[in-house]
Image (spheres, helix red, strand yellow):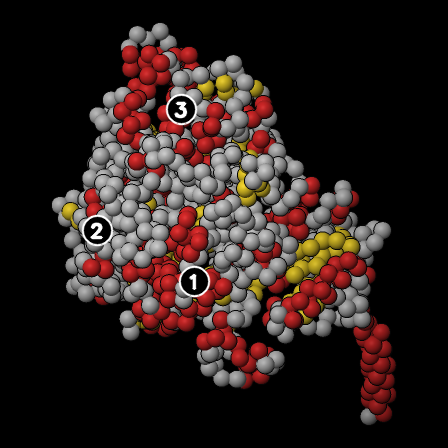
Amino acid sequence: MGSNMAEQHPVGFQWVIEAKERGARVIHVDPRFSRTSAMADLHVPIRAGTDIAFLGGIVNYIFEHDAVFEDYVRNYTNAPVIISREFQDVEDSSGFFSGWDPDNSAYFIDSWGYNKAGGEATAGKHEQLADVSGEQAHGAHGMKLKGGQPPDVDATMQDEYCVLQLVRRHFARYTPQVVADICGCKPEHVETVARALCQNSGRERTSAVVYAVGWTHHTVGVQNIRAASIVQMLLGNIGRPGGGILALRGHANIQGSTDIPTLYNILPGYIPMPHPQRHPSLDKFVELNGPDTGAWGDLRPYIVSLLKAWWGDAATEDNEFCFQYLPRINGDHSHYAMMLKMLDGGVRGMLCVGQNPAVGSANSRLIRLALAKLDWLVVRDFAPNETALFWKDSPEHETGEARAQDIQTEVFFLPAAAHTEKDGSFTNTQRLLQWHHKACEPPGDSRSDLHWIYHLGRAIREKLAGSEDPKDRPVLDLTWDYPLQGPHQEPDAEHILQEISGRKADGSFLDSYDDLKADGSTSCGSWIHCGVYKDGVNQAARKKPHSQQNWIAHEWGWAWPKDTRMIYNRASADPEGRPWSERKRYVWWDAEQEQWESLGDSPDFPPTKAPDYRPSGRDKKMEAIAGDKPFILHPDGRAWLYVPTGLVDGPLPSHYEPQESPFKNPLYAQQSNPTRQVFHRPENPYHPVDGELGAEVFPFVLTTYRLTEHHTAGGMSRTVPYLAELQPEFFCEVSPALAAERGLEHGGWATIVTARAAVEARVLVTERIKPLVVQGRTAHVVGAPYHWGGVGIVTGDSANDLLPLALDNNVHISEYKVATCDIKPGRRPRGRARLELVEEYRRRAGVKT
Amino acid sequence: MSRVGFFTDTSVCIGCKACEVACKEWNQIPMSMHGFSGKSYDNTLDLGANTWRHVAFIEQKLPLDARADGASLVDVAQASTAASNGHGMLDTYQEGDGLRWLMASDVCKHCTDAACLEVCPTGALFRTEFGTVVVQEDVCNGCGYCVPACPFGVLDQREDDGRVWKCTLCYDRLKDDKEPACAQACPTNSIQFGELDVLHERAEHRLAALREAGQSDAQLYLADSDDGIHGAGAFFLLLDEPEVYGLPPDPVDTRHHLGEIWAAAGTAAVALGAGLLAAAFGGRRG
């Protein structure tokens, strides 16, 4: 679900095909019949933006049919934990959880916590605002919990306020019929899929869930994935071979650039970025950001070793290891927040690397208007793209809104090297790092990103050399000493991998993050990657063929953490440490040797901690995790069916309609996710939704997506002849019924209109787009791949111009997958008339701008 | 050296077109820009001088109940378009909600009886030591005789230079003991390269498995050495009749009828001559 794997990850899809040949059943639940659906045993079409309802139907089925894997759920999840009796579910209060604060559009979360544990977030905060610096704003690390023990537990899981019963009640209304009415599928679809999952789970079998941006690109993105987690936890499908929830990450290294982040709000290894006021000292930072039980209890050695990697000898006990050198953030500087600030003149310059926001971002017209407010812009890519050329070639130039002579932005274009022209690693969905070696030198002036960043830093340091100004110290004290090689003075990428992997004081390499010290005697650029250069060997470059090792392939590449191929794999054994079944044997406790054994993976658990180990109640860090609690990154070692802290929009997933929807939320008075992030401003108008005046002006569901033949915003494919010819023009996909209703001609042109933009596309009428009946009405869908723009061998209008900015406030990702629109036959008007068409639609719909 | 070739198993083709791109990249074939075709996701349209691998996309909406009974395409076409019942449609292989999207990568067949090769006056077309059929670009003079000789319409002259270009089964790679670029790029092993005998055996097993899984229309195409071209070096497993994929159902070596054609032409010439004589003499008489 939420993934078009055959089209977007065709190389990985070979394993799905192979599994299918060996008897696996492949089910694709997706609004569109794609190349993935064509290969599946079963395709279930659902309305875009209704995944939680469908998954909720599966959860309900699991309870109704007594399919909960009880031994797993009782011991490994927080199902028996009793929640504060103040907690109120959305089911009881018209779509809001308890604690709603309408003034801030946020929740006070005191009533969400474990009973008798206090409900506040780690930092002592009571309101789960989406401010993003430190204090668990990222949500992953969990609350402080004395001794790692939930204080109030009902092992029978019968208490009305224990998690299992809360989950059961929460999803009780998601009956097959209710789900069918929301999703537009048939009730038996829900039952067929749920039955297949239940039959294929348990001691002897496991099922896997695969998703991608089809789940994340929603105002309920995080909760889509949460809903799948609940299904997989109830069925016991996490930490066991053949199970899991697999996030297919972007091409080709989105996982790697999250782990060692290009994100603004975290440091390497998911350590939060410090806040200027709340983290005056390293001590305070560690106190407020780590739960003191579980693997995060060792936050101090992780961050001290990071500071040592960055500032070397300058980082000492006396100066808090240069903690004060770290940049601070005090607000939301995510992509769209930044672009809006830019639009308001608050950003002077931008370095844009490997991204083409003038085509790829939602409401890309707004993005282009923002770029024009910059003093300077640097774009690094293979060839000048729409972002680099926005100043002279954009839809706004065509309509007369923009003129090159009026745009003051100075644009620098720097040609970038391809992955074949540099050393480095890719990280895949399994957290597996695979090293790639340079095949040839980059042509002409093209250089790697590493080359550019290193030499930029070197030039800045040379400029600052000799400065007495304290604000220059963080730059001057950096360990910026990488060996250079080759004709272009390329920094040695392996040397950087060594810094990431970490060293002891004597310069020898570290084995794992267990060896990291808080006293400054170790350095490590990313604690989760500690050991990737173990024994002085680039472990990520290991390429022992599968024919020479077993199926775990432990000697191919390297996976974080500690070369663990399957995370939380302690859960593959029962609470006593025995395999759940012979068929699913993976990691088990060897009582004679008194250690964990495995088929060939690294056990993701302290190697000699016995299954019957129990913490004292006063223990901290890993000592607080019992021998039968596999989820060691959580303060209680349990997987969370119910999330007491960390999410802005509630501890359980609930169905909300997308920001723009032709239908009312049939479950609650609250139409959409109440915490979603919206921006009411003239450049970003929203459509009325069902029941509001003017909603009928935009009657159809619009969904944007990608094709195998192109790469995202087209910068790497519209410029390549052999790819450009495969999908040469922007087209939209509509059903025969919608084509008949709107007079659209197959092979002809159509104009798609929203309150943001009007674009033209060729028309592909296809049975693969299926109108669905929802609440007794037909939901028509307009499908629009978003790859095209004004530059390249093949050009066309950009589908993402049509979308509004409406974000999931947990992660600030926009709802690309669903909006509303109108469609009419023929090409769009040219020049000013194009603006007038959009204006006319806004007027008719009563959209205020 | 034993004869090598392709077995293209269309039942696992995901339509990624990696074969088209890898082929063009390796063989440095010019771009063939046709624009938006409206033919499902196929915009390269056909095999030609500039397209040596081509992926066809066929969208079918068929009443599945009829097909499950083993009815022929004609029966199906004549049947009503009544919607299939709920459960039946859920359990069909590679089909959802009555919809089927077939994808298949086509290529030069490297026929056993290759007419193109026989009609080539310059010897530019020849059979290699691997049993494949290759055009030598430095010998081809662009006469185009081979173009109508091909029963599959594979041979094609490049517009700007007039010469004929087609799949070489990566002759240069074979000589280096490497598999053809398309087969190497194919992620799902839909395109398999190897010794023909081995491939035939594998194909038979695969066909049996698919038939057992209820794919009653699954069939091998060009795997029979008794057919009109005596089998091919590139054969296919199809999920429907060849016509559905735009392939000739019963291809015949165009030279097979040459004798009959010459005989007929001879008879006609004799008859014509007799007629002319008769006319001439008859005229004199008149």
Same subunit, tags 2 and 1: yes
Relative horizontal placement of residue A672, taking residue A18 as reference (left or right): left
- The reply to whether callout 1 and callout 3 are in contact (CB within 8 Å) is no
Residue A270 visible in the shown view: no
Q: Residue B76 shows which numbered tag?
A: none
Towards the viewer: B70 or A165: A165
Q: Residues within 10 Å of mark 1 (few under 14, many from 20)?
A: some
Q: Residue A301 shows which numbered tag?
A: 3
* Residue A338 position within the rendered picture, expressed as x and y whole percent measured from the top left: 28, 36
Asked where in the image residue A702 lies, by quadrant, the reply is bottom left
Q: Residue A85 shows which numbered tag?
A: 2
Q: Residues within 10 Å of mark 2 (few under 14, many from 20)?
A: some
Q: Is residue A298 above or below residue B6?
A: above
Secondary structure of residue under mark 3? helix
* Residue A298 position within the rendered picture, expressed as x and y whole percent measured from the top left: 39, 28
Identified by mark 1, the residue type is Ala
Secondary structure of residue under mark 2? loop
Q: Give the residue displayed 66% in from the left and 56% down from the top.
A: B191
Work out whether mark 3 precedes mark 2 in sequence or the reverse, and give the earlier one: 2
Work out whether mark 2 precedes mark 1 in sequence or the reverse, and give the earlier one: 1
Q: Give the residue displayed 31% in from the left and 26% down from the top.
A: A286
Relative horizontal placement of residue B223, taking residue A90 as reference (left or right): right
Q: CA distance from mark 3 to mark 2?
A: 37 Å
Q: Label 1 belongs to which residue?
A: A67
Identified by mark 3, the residue type is Pro
Secondary structure of residue under mark 1? loop
Q: CA distance from mark 2 to mark 1?
A: 27 Å
Q: Quadrant of the C terminus of chain B?
A: bottom right
Which residue is outermost to the left? Answer: A103
Residue B201 visible in the shown view: yes
Q: Given this view, does label 3 or label 2 mark the residue nearer the observer?
A: 2
Identified by mark 2, the residue type is Arg
